[in-house]
Image (tube, helix red, strand yellow):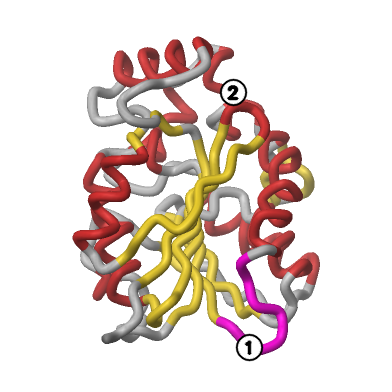
Amino acid sequence: MHACCCGANQHHTVLGSLIFSRFIPWLEARICSPKMLCASAAERNKEPIVSVLRDCVEPSRPLKALEISSGSGQHVVHFAQAFRNVTWQPSDIDAQSVSSIQAYRNHLKLDNVKSPIQLDASQSWENWGGFDPESLDIVVNINMMHISPLACTKGLFKGAGIILKPQGLLFTYGPYSVNGVITPQSNVDFDFSLRQRNPEWGLRDVSFLNSLAEENGLFLQKMVDMPANNKCLLFRKESRV
């Protein structure tokens, strides 16, 4: 989804290469209705992502979730309809994205989606909208890490390690390298193009993310291969001893 912090939201005005449209939905976004942005990539991947979430989100009790870098809002409203027991808090740093999320919320009248907030993942969790430590069951982050500075990724893991409850889930989706290897060639080309345009961008390595997770009281529970050479990474917060 839409890049989250430190000026990365400007990518939709400066990137024109067709290769980016596979991973940066804003390059092929269109207006579905006034203020409602519609990215075809989000339409394609929202149901495959829900399929993975179904295996790890408990359906029988009320839960609280934060989506960081919600972009257009297509994902969060789809998730809210699939998981009615979860109260979703969408967020983005970009004002146009926040307006789009609110437009989807108004259109669908979902009572389990809160009004979106502006959130910069590179900033300390205390500036994320007033969440208390260990107050959330789920944090979701889709297609942010590779198109934002590393400070956003570090902030994501640090914040999630604090605001998630014990055994809470940090769920991320996007293209990643594994043990320093990027596959297939289209992802290699994509990573090169990202780094040419901004040296702070690029595919993050799963081993590095697992190290970040462990530094913040999380562990990589599962990695799921997804369509279009993406992956879902499921991190859990350690339980108290």
Q: Foreground residue, 236 or 103? A: 236
Badge 2 amino acid: Ser
Residue bearing mark 2: 21
Is residue 231 placed above or below 88 in the rendered structure?
A: above
Q: Which x, y percent locates residue 209?
A: 31, 46
Residue 62 numbered tag:
1
Query: Residue 122 lies in what quarter of the image?
Result: bottom left
Q: Are marks 1 and 2 in contact (CB under 8 Å)?
A: no
Badge 1 amino acid: Pro
C-alpha separation, residue under disc 1 versus residue under disc 2: 36 Å
Residue 77 numbered tag:
none
Bounds of the magenta segment: 56-63
Residue 171 in the figure: left or right of residue 52 = left
Residue at point 67% right, 63% down? 55
Residue at point 61% right, 67% down? 56
Indicate the secondary structure of the residue bearing disc 2. Answer: helix
Q: Residue furthest bottom?
A: 61
Q: Which x, y percent locates residue 17?
A: 52, 12
Any part of residue 169 in sight? yes
Q: Which x, y percent locates residue 39?
A: 68, 38
Is residue 121 placed above or below 132 in the rendered structure?
A: above
CA neighbours of label 1 inside 10 A, class few (<14), some (14 to 19), many (20+): few
Marks 1 and 2: which is nearer the front?
A: 1
